[in-house]
Image: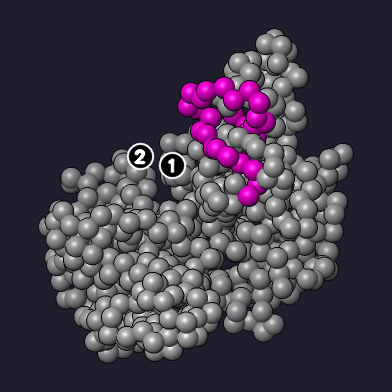
Amino acid sequence: MAMSLRHKHLDVIKRMLNLNQPLPAGGTGDDAVYKVLVVDKFCRDILSPLIHLHELRKHGVTICFMIDVERQNIPDAPAIYFVQPTAPNIHRIIQDAARGVYESFHLNFSSSLPRALLEELAMGALKNDCMHRLSKVFDQYAEFVTLDTAMFSLALPDTYVRLNDPSAQDKDIETAVDAIVNGLFSVFVTLGVVPVLRCARGGPAEMVATQLDARIRDHLVSRNNLFTEPGHFGTSFQRPLCCIFDRNFELSVGVQHVWTYRPLVHDVLGMKLNRVVVQGEGAAAGVAGKGAAKSFELDESDTFWVANNAAAFPKVAEEVEAQLKKYKEDVEEVNRRTGGRADVPFDEQELLGNTKHLMSAVNSLPELTERKKMIDKHTNIATALLGEIKSRNLDGFYSLEEDMLTKGTVDKTALLGALKGKGTSDDKLRLGLVYLLSMESAAGAEIESVEAALREARVDVTSFLYVKRIRSLNISLASVNTGSKSNLVDWLSTTVTAGVKNFLSAGRQLALTRTVESLMEARLAPELESYMTLDPRAPKGSAPGIHTKGPFKEAVVFMIGGGNYLEHGSLVELGQRCQPGKNIIYGCTEVVTGAELSRQLGVLGHKMGVDASA
């Protein structure tokens, strides 16, 4: 089985927590050595989805501090610093070392420490006579956030704006591209592989691919080559493919509404770093002031989440009810076998008070307790989603957008009705954007009527006008699939999903997924003839070798300008559908909701001078 990016990234972190010593067979370091962990915000976000607090303690970390807060001296404890290589962080490290805040300083930088900052660190330590406290300095090449076994983000905000800003200077573009290349280089160092690069010619994708190729080439001939080991993230000796895309390749996917569980939790409830906050039952039902906010973690330790995150929302709600029913049946069975009553709540004391089948019942108690916590978690999340779906008509927006994206047509009356009906301003703006991006043959008068409906609904139309202007200049912003159909299933009548339509796509495949499949299978498609192939291991200027031709079993797909869970899920499904299966890792500059990307389009509209008041 292919090794996941998450596992490899976690191995790097665990080794760092073990003072960069090899981990023993058990996978945890020496917890007898009590350590302090100091991080900055970026590196805290790297750790958050990877390792929990109790796991830090297993590695001897007793307390964690932010680097920019005042801290008391703990002179008998070693400190592990995990920070980005920035001038403010270097200054703070020198200050802490000069004060003797900790016994020793184990410095770990998320990416390569530039020589200028290394010299500044050395000079500062010498000047303050604290060099003896600096134990070692490590470049960890961990400048990315792993969100799943096969998904990562570089956590670079507003990259879409930075790379499409009409007023951006060359140095601004170069800085943005350098940050992306730095993050991608870290990913491949962590995976231990040198990829074959593919991208469309022109634009940010080519810029990133070309610079990443040069970065890896330079590193391969350096004395400190991190790719010398035959590391690979699968069982094959074949190198992986790296497909790099720009958000404008399929802009509609970034703004459209979604209907599967994980994309919905992110888009509607604002999941960040695998954690979502929802209101209690009273608040979810619309009762003001009722229900305390609850925070839930959603990762691979949650078996329900792993099994259902790609399912349509009504199917998830049905599964929650099925799990709850099964749980109640199991509790009744335990009560029956231990002499308890089935008509009273499950009680641990009652269970322990009965000696019949005692050991079996005691052994089942932790598992039943965990199942109940998991069911309660997803009941809370599903209820919060249902409240938003009903109040905002999200099923209606999704249905209209699917029709436009799959059929290339739309019921004009239904479209204008949705723009005048329920939903937030962001919901209506996103519907208007999908209309612009999918209805290529729409007449000017039709577009004007949609714009008028948005204005009537008091929606800021700057984003709409920006895309409209780009569209009028015949710049291709999106690739849409017009060859598949959408199917609407009857209304469900279950408790949680009453009144919500269950939408099942009848084969619609994202343009991104179709292209990745063609690139991995090395198909001779006309639309791929212009795609560049770069091999960092090949002599510069030489033609790509036979080993770069494919087909490929593994790939890293990277989206510049903002990615989303819809694309991730589509690529996971592709990997599972292929025979034999393929291992596909999805990454992006940042994970954005449709509303967040719409706002970035609005920022570009303002920078372009679009007048929304006209």
Q: Badge 1 local density, few (<14 within 10 Å), some, or many (20+)? A: some
- Looking at the rendering, the stretch of residues picked out in magenta corresponds to 58-86
**On the rendered structure, is 181 left or right of 237?**
left
| Quarter assignment of residue 26 | bottom right
Q: Position of residue 253 (x, y in %)?
A: 42, 65
Image-quadrant location for residue 182: top right
The x and y percentages for residue 242 are: 67, 60
**Residue under label 2:** 607
Task: Look at label 2 and name its amino acid.
Answer: Lys
Label 2 neighbour load within 10 Å: few <14, some 14-19, many 20+: some
Could you tell me which secondary element the residue under label 1 belongs to? loop
The quarter of the image holding the N terminus is bottom right
Are discs 1 and 2 less than 8 Å apart at CB?
yes
Whole-percent x, y for residue 276 in the image:
38, 57
Considering the numbered disc 2 on the image, is that residue within a helix, a strand or a loop? Answer: helix
201 vs 453, left or right, is right
Question: Residue 145 location, x and y as percent?
Answer: 56, 51
The residue lying toward the viewer, choosing from 283 and 610, is: 283
Residue 451 is at least partly visible in this image: no
Say which of 256 and 540 sits in front. Answer: 256
- Point 82% across, 68% down: residue: 237
Please name whichever residue, 130 or 219, is drawn nearer the observer in this view of the structure.
130
The image shows a total of numbered marks equal to 2
**Mark closer to the chain start, 1 or 2:** 1
**Residue visible at 22% across and 58% down?**
291
Residue assigned mark 1: 165
Q: Which amino acid does label 1 sit on?
A: Asp
The residue drawn where x is 28% and y is 70% is 383
Q: Give above or below for 526 relative to 447.
A: below
